[in-house]
Image (cartoon, grey):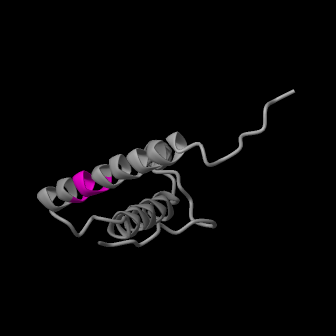
Amino acid sequence: MATNQPKQGSENDDCSFLPLVHDIIKCMDKDSQDVHQELVKFKTRIQEAREQIGAMPGIDMSLSEQQHELETLREQVRTKNQLLQKYKSLCMFEVPKAS
């Protein structure tokens, strides 16, 4: 079971490419020399998105493996809920009454 955590913090979580495409089109309409610079920004953002996708937990697992993992986790939740209900029914805990 892969337990890689996605990177948090300084990375930009924005996955929108539309503003970058819009900037490229604006530069092309103006015959600006900035088109190359905007294309480099776009390529960089595409590469960052590829790296983020590659770092996602479970991305290396097939669909059937992911479904199996999901079913295993659901079974664990069911078991833990059953145990929790069992322990609650034992009345071993004193629950203070709200005043």
- Which residue extends farthest left? 64
| Depth check, front residue: 54 or 15 | 54
Q: Quadrant of the C terminus?
A: top right
Q: Which corner quadrant of the image does residue 96 belong to?
A: top right
Considering the whole magenta stretch, tell me its main secondary structure.
helix
Q: Which corner quadrant of the image does residue 76 belong to?
A: bottom left
Q: Is residue 76 above or below residue 78?
A: below
Spot occupied by residue 23 in the image (x, y as percentages of width and height): 50, 47
Spot occupied by residue 71 in the image (x, y as percentages of width and height): 23, 51
Spot occupied by residue 64 in the image (x, y as percentages of width and height): 12, 57
Residue shown at the point (41%, 65%) measured from the top left: 52
Which residue range is magenta in the image?
69-73
- Which residue extends farthest top? 99
Spot occupied by residue 92 in the image (x, y as percentages of width and height): 61, 48
Q: State left or right for residue 79 relative to residue 16.
A: left
Q: State left or right for residue 75 relative to residue 99.
A: left
Residue shown at the point (39%, 45%) measured from the top left: 82
| Depth check, front residue: 81 or 11 | 81
Q: Is residue 28 above or below residue 1?
A: above
Residue shown at the point (59%, 42%) measured from the top left: 91
Is residue 57 found inside the magenta-colored segment of the image? no
Q: Is residue 22 above or below residue 69?
A: above
